[in-house]
């Protein structure tokens, strides 16, 4: 939890409490339904919560922003972002029902009224959103094609509407076709931990 306060020192007391409770909630639910590898649970705050919040280092979502988290798994990056941006709405989806059960239980326990979770494939979603976020669920061009239909036209944030993708390693080939519409931010510019050395935040204006 201290690592979150290190990089986000201006949290409200309510936000601090919610971030603090994530450990107990994920420890409990991960024992029932494995959504995070057992060895990774010890690094929950660094590898999952802070990694999700890297998005908040490149954009501060304005109130009313609608965000869809595709392939959310256990709720990342959606749950940490929903705690940080309570005036924005988050729609967390996954094609695996048991993962959405964990997301729903965690969101309910934290009283996150700005979160809706659903067991559904993105191909079935017809609603439009300001941003579609994800943690590298598939090759980037394939992901773009899946969610293109879900992007709203009208911008209301510092970055144009589109995709914000958390990705690790070298993937220049995957993004080369998008030219100037794509921006890549190194997580290591914001976080000093070794884990973030190869992690990137990718924004595509669509």
Image (tube, rainbow, N blue to C red):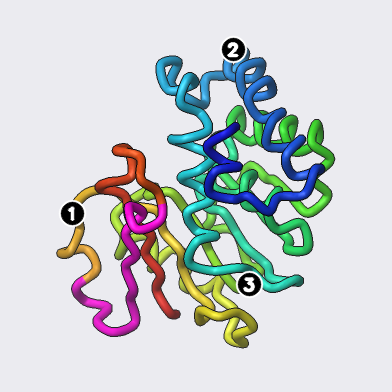
The residue carrying pointer 1 sits among few (fewer than 14), some (14 to 19) or many (20 or more) residues within 10 Å by Cα, namely few
Work out whether residue 140 or residue 43 is closer to the camera in this orientation and state it: 43
Q: Check the image and name the residue furthest to the top.
A: 31
Q: Residue at x 76, y 35 (%)?
A: 17
In this view, the residue farthest toward the bottom is: 154
Q: Residue at x 21, y 63 (%)?
A: 174
Nearest-to-viewer mark from 1 and 2: 1
Residue 7 image offset from top left, x and y in percent = 53, 49
Whether residues under marks 1 and 3 lie with C-beta atoms below 8 angstroms apart, the answer is no
Compute the Cα span from label 1 to label 2: 33 Å
Boundaries of the magenta span: 176-190
Q: Nearer the viewer, residue 131 or 51?
A: 51
> Where is the C terminus found, in terms of image quarters?
bottom left
Please tell me which of labels 2 and 3 falls first in the chain.
2
Q: Is residue 126 above or below residue 31?
A: below
Q: Could you tell me if residue 95 is visible in this image?
A: no
Disc 1, SS: loop
- Residue 105 vs 16, above or below: the answer is above
At horizontal 45% and vertical 15% (from top left) the residue drawn is 38
First in residue order: circle 1 vs circle 2: 2
Q: Which mark is residue 31?
A: 2
- Considering the whole magenta stretch, tell me its main secondary structure: helix
Q: Mark on residue 199? A: none
x then y, percent, for residue 134: 47, 53
Alpha carbons under labels 1 and 3: distance apart: 30 Å
Would you name the residue on which mark 1 appears? 170
Q: Are marks 1 and 2 in contact (CB under 8 Å)?
A: no
Where is mark 3, residue-wise? Answer: 128
């Amino acid at each position: 939890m201290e690592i979150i306060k290190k990089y986000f020192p201006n949290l409200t007391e309510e936000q601090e409490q919610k971030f603090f409770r994530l450990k107990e909630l994920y420890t409990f639910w991960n024992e029932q339904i494995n959504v995070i590898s057992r060895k990774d649970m010890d690094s929950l705050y660094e590898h999952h919560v802070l990694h999700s919040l890297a998005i908040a280092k490149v954009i501060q979502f304005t109130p009313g922003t609608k965000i869809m988290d595709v392939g959310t798994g256990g709720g990342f990056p959606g749950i940490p972002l929903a705690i940080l941006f309570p005036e924005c709405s988050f729609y967390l989806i996954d094609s695996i029902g048991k993962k959405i059960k964990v997301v729903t239980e965690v969101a309910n326990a934290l009283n996150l009224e700005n979160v809706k979770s659903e067991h559904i494939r993105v191909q079935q979603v017809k609603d439009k959103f300001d941003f579609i976020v994800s943690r590298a669920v598939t090759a980037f061009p394939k992901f773009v094609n899946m969610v293109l239909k879900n992007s709203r036209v009208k911008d209301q944030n510092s970055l144009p509407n589109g995709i914000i993708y958390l990705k690790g390693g070298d993937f220049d080939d995957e993004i080369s076709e998008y030219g100037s519409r794509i921006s890549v931010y190194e997580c290591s510019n914001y976080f000093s931990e070794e884990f973030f050395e190869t992690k990137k935040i990718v924004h595509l204006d669509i």
